[in-house]
Amino acid sequence: MLDFKYFECIAALLRLPGDSCVPPSGQDSILEPLCFPEQPTDSSDAPSLQRPSSELLVCLFCSESVPLLQKDVLLKHLLLEHKMVIADVKLIADLPKYMLYWKGRFLEQPVTDFCSVIKTNSTGPVEKQEDYFLLCDILPEDRILREKLQQKRLEEVLEQQQQERDDTSFHRLCMFCSEEFTGNRSSLLNHMAREHSFSIGLPDNIVYCSEFLDTLQSKLDNLQCLYCEKTFRDKTTLKDHMRKKAHRRINANNREYDRFYVINYLELGKTWEEVQSEDDRELVDDEDDDWSDWQAHPVSAVCLFCDHQSETMDQIYTHMKEAHGFDLHKLRTELNLRFYQQVKLVNFIRRQIHQSRCYGCQEKFDSRDNVLRHIMAEGHVMKLPDMSTWDQPQYYFPTYENDALLCTLSDSDEDGNDETNHGEDVPVIAEDISNLRALKQTSVLNQLLKNRGSCS
């Protein structure tokens, strides 16, 4: 079984941040992968560590610029106007400096000297083919730049933390009893933990403490519970709620607080919960890792035809077979489908149903409900069009980026041999990448982990 990250890497090539873009008429494409609304939020998202800033982000190729807080607007501009995708933007410690560096490099040398080039619709007519550029840390220069920016940010955070630890000019009132505290910040934090059972962690683990306390005070002033984040009619009701419900704590799932904890700056892309739960001994030698006892969160796979979800793959396959008469295992056997052909088939069906079109006869309807009624009434559930219709490169891209059904498809050794022997089965072939595993093996995250292990 493959994890979501594999498919996210593929989806990132054509992902649009912000609002979806309506394709030109005549084009059957979805530039932004959809997302099942029923799925829970992925807690593995990188913490938001960017401080509020008026600093501008500049386009790599033209004079377009936006404030840092509107970075999605510029990323969308890069994709639509310049066909450029930057991988793992959330893991870039200082995005403005990153953009300025590459803007200068692209003025010196052609973009193709640095970026992987991905050709879309490679089997279609030449006039419909387009080249997209992927800038990622598989390029040594990019990886070194990201590491330097991360290291500089870590040094700045540690310097700020040390200043706060040594500061004796701290002055603030307690949020709960209005008692006044002066001297060191630890006196207030320890007081709130001891007298009011409200702890945000050890003082030495906190950075930007005054800003953190301002954020919490603002929520209380707006009559908002710090834990469940519900709003109440007055302060008395709020205090009673927080006391009776034991809600005198912060919501650990609120990513707004991540930048106030030093541990979030130590490893790119990891939250304090993930770092804290790791055993450092396992980081020394990652070649002999034993994943047999690894426990993942339950996977909720969504049916191809309705909103039914199941937490085990056997259940979702049984549901589709019994409720809708769709047998994916039977199709795989009858058509002798290899792994990537199964991926394309699932994405094809997802996309056709999303566009209210019968995947069997290609008839278009005005709603999803109507096309599903047609599929069942006409017996088109197991009717597939000619393989050339759906065995196309564009269906390597997930229609729904959190489609757990893709992770259940068979990935046998035989399929692996087919992948090796048939170049057309490789999902995306960049001009300078022949093995997609290099994306994981040379990731800046892996390199940082190795460096950390060697220094410990």
Image (cartoon, rainbow, N blue to C red):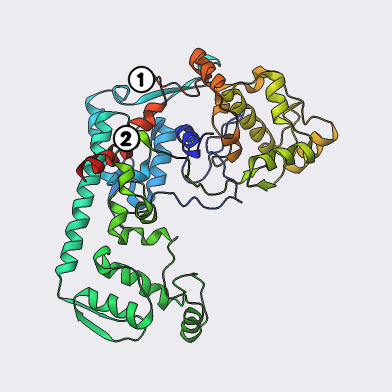
Which labelled disc corresponds to residue 432? Answer: 1
Residue 323 is labelled as: none
As helix, strand or loop, the secondary structure at mark 2 comes to loop
Q: Can residue 268 be seen in this view?
A: yes
| Relative vertical location of residue 244 with respect to residue 216 in this rendering, above or below | below
The residue tagged with tag 1: helix, strand or loop? loop
Q: Look at label 2 and name its amino acid.
A: Cys
- Tell me if 429 is positioned left or right of 187 in this view: right
With 369 as the anchor, is 292 left or right in this view?
Answer: left
Q: In this orientation, does residue 59 appear?
A: no
Q: Relative to the observer, which residue lies in front, 332 or 184?
A: 332
Q: Position of residue 224 (x, y in %)?
A: 46, 74
Marks 1 and 2: which is nearer the front? 1
- Disc 1 and disc 2: Cα gap in Å? 26 Å
Looking at the image, residue 263 sits to the left or right of residue 255; the answer is left
Q: In the picture, which quadrant includes the N terminus?
A: top right
| Residue 71 position in % (x across, y down) | 37, 47
Residue positioned most to the top: 421
Circle number at residue 62: 2
Mark 1 or mark 2: whose residue is earlier in sequence: 2
Q: In which quarter of the image is residue 49?
A: bottom left
What residue is at 54 percent from the left and 22 percent from the top? 413
